[in-house]
Amino acid sequence: MHILQVGLSQQTAPVEVREQLALAEEAIPDALRRLCPNNGCGPGYALEGAILSTCNRLEAYAVVECADEGQRDLGDYLTRVTGAPQATFGAYLQVRMGEAAVAHLCEVACGLDSLVLGESQIQGQVASAHQMAMAHGAAGPIINALFRTALQAGKRARTETAINRHATSISHVAVELALQIFDNLATKSALLVGAGEMAELAAKNLVDNGVGKLLVVNRSAGRAAGLAKRYGGEALGWHRLTQALWKSDIVISSTAAPHPVLRREAVATAMRMRRSRPLFIIDIAVPRDVEPDVGRLNNVFLYDIDDLQEVLAANLEQRQREVPRVRAIVQQEVDGFMAWLQARDVVPTIVDLRRHVDGIREEELAWALNKLSGLSDRERRVLMAFSQRLVNKILHQPTVRLKQRATGREAYHYTEAIRDLFGIDGRDPCSEGRDSHG
Amino acid sequence: MVDVLLFLLAVLLYALSTIAHVAGWIGGSRRCERLARPTLLAAVVLHGTAILLRWIEAGYAPLSNGFEAFSFYAWGLSLAYLLVPSLRRHAVLGVFVTPLALLSILVASVLPKRIEPLVPVLQSHWLPIHVGISFAAYAMFSLAFVAAVAYLLQLRALRRPGRWFWARQLPSLEALETLQRRTALVGLVLMTGALISGSLWAEKAWGIVWPWEPQQVASLVTWFIYALYFFISHNIGWQDRRGAWLLVGGFVSVILTFVGADLLMLDSRHSFLFGS
């Protein structure tokens, strides 16, 4: 029995290939049913499976009996469900097996394989891929444990390292900077100078982060009013720009003006009016809207687009530095999972089965000996031998059969059935991970 | 002896907490970050017990010599840090508080620890009151200093976007400014109390309300610096780096009050820090 991963992502395949293999969300239930009909009991491609489909990747995870056949089958399967001829994507297809496949899913969940390193959306996408697989009968004990392991790794990466700590988009960097200056955005007013696309994005971001008040000043009053209305702000005429400055703590300027619209004198006056309370100005216009000298004023924090880019680059570099720590977490989780998985092979299953039944024997023997007081030594020995012989006789045939099946195609079904029927499911790799890592 | 043992254990915990704070916030270890505060709490509890035991053993408030003073400062500062509610939200400031406490307790640990009979002038109920209030004031001024340093670092981080990564985790300028003002205000009120209680004690002990002791003068200077800070930040609007620098200056004055006057004027009535 093997774990296989087949798929492609933005790291390996160009968009022309990815778009051919894209799988719409509605198509996934059907694809899962085809991957493993009746949870591996019918003639499907795999015993268990799951599909992770996002705009940047399509990956199938499968538990198969035979590794070589499984690889071939899964390529074939992708052709079937996506309708794309294998010749178009074959060269880009990544295939991983066993531990590599497990590690890959963990790394994906941690965001190590994402376009924006460490982004957290992927964690939710991995979780919903698992939900889908469970809902449509494709997930079994191994896929469940695999996804729980990956989600656990993703969760740990985000709580124990700084892989997702610093903002990775210009608008988030702006909010991050604002929060280095202001404690509580709810008591602050923001002023948008210009009502273009960038201003709109900034407005949305500020409102999402709970800014208290929004003012919009634009040359064209109509657009200012529209933008203000959409985000619950107030539109002011262009001539009231200086006044609006007095009342604002955050200014985002993005006009198309060919010359500065915020001059040093105007800002200096505003600073006097606001008794030097901090003023945070972001100038995302090119050419710049704010005279660079404004940044020299006391308690004025001025950033242009290059400054923001610089922060962005530094943030990504910082995330990059966390990668080894995330890999260490992934390794721990993978080790835990692999140990759990190995325990599900035939021989460990036989050992577990014998231990389980022997436990019952000992318990019942103790009960019987307790009830039958006053037995002679000989009688006790006979009773003990009886219980031992009974257990051995019952387990003999299953043990022999399991050993015969160890290398056969049915090993997975036999071991899973034994574990299920006798209720010896082994430890959950995730709970083990939690115990050993606090 | 038990108190010295507890004291040494507390020193160890202060050191561990300092390491955990630095490793947690600067080194980025989340596990250290989680352990930092509980370790400091344990240090404060042990240290507090040590002080209490010493009080019982000596029969007077253990605030009479250098060891006791530095030890008490470390304890008071850490306790104040743990108690000020808004600092719980800004646990990163422990990076500055714990080294300060550690430094003070390390100084204490090299000073003679033997319990000596109290010199007559200190045998008074005013001892715990006056010294206690003074140390509470020092603790608050120290926190104001920490907030001011963090403010200046955050300011620097904001001036150099993309660099000074570590400082970006500090509380916002606004939060630090509020913290500076509040801790300095509480400190100023306590310092007023220290000056008044000191004068009353002086009146009782020596019959003079204001004997122009070096430490007394230094305290008055300190008091004026913080009063000036409030006046300027309120009326002239120095709620920026100048205000923060003033608080740094105030803290230097606190150190001079605490230690300097003693070192310079060994014949002073206040000089019991390093023995005489």
Image: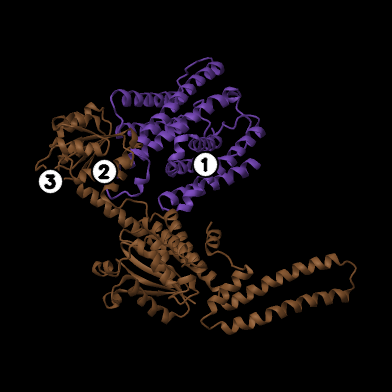
Residue A262 shows up from this direction: no
Q: Residue B131, how many percent across, how many down?
A: 53, 27
Q: Colour of chain A?
A: brown
Q: What's the amino acid at mark 1?
A: Ile
**Cβ atoms under marks 1 and 2 closer than 8 Å:** no
Q: Quadrant of the N terminus of chain B?
A: top right
Instruction: Please state if A414 lies on the left or on the right of A274 as rendered.
Output: right
- What's the distance in space between the residues labelled 1 and 2, CA to CA? 35 Å
Q: What's the amino acid at mark 3?
A: Pro
User: What chain letter is assigned to the residue under label 3?
Assistant: A
Residue situated in front as seen by the camera: A293 or A86 = A86
Q: Residue A297, how many percent across, how many down?
A: 21, 35
Q: Residue A376, how many percent across, how many down?
A: 90, 73
In the image, the chain rendered in purple is B
* First-in-chain label (1 vs 2): 1
- What's the distance in space between the residues labelled 3 and 1, CA to CA? 57 Å
User: What chain letter is assigned to the residue under label 1?
Assistant: B
Q: Quadrant of residue A199?
A: top left
**Cβ atoms under marks 3 and 1 closer than 8 Å:** no
> Residue B105 — which label?
1
Q: Give the structural element (helix, strand or loop) at label 1.
A: helix
Residue pointed to by mark 2: B159
User: What chain letter is assigned to the residue under label 2?
Assistant: B
- What residue sits 42% from the left and 78% below the top? A70
Q: Residue A135, how many percent across, how many down?
A: 46, 62
Q: What's the amino acid at mark 2?
A: Arg
Q: Give the structural element (helix, strand or loop) at label 3.
A: loop
Residue situated in front as seen by the camera: A430 or B135 = A430
Q: Is disc 2 on the same chain as disc 3?
A: no
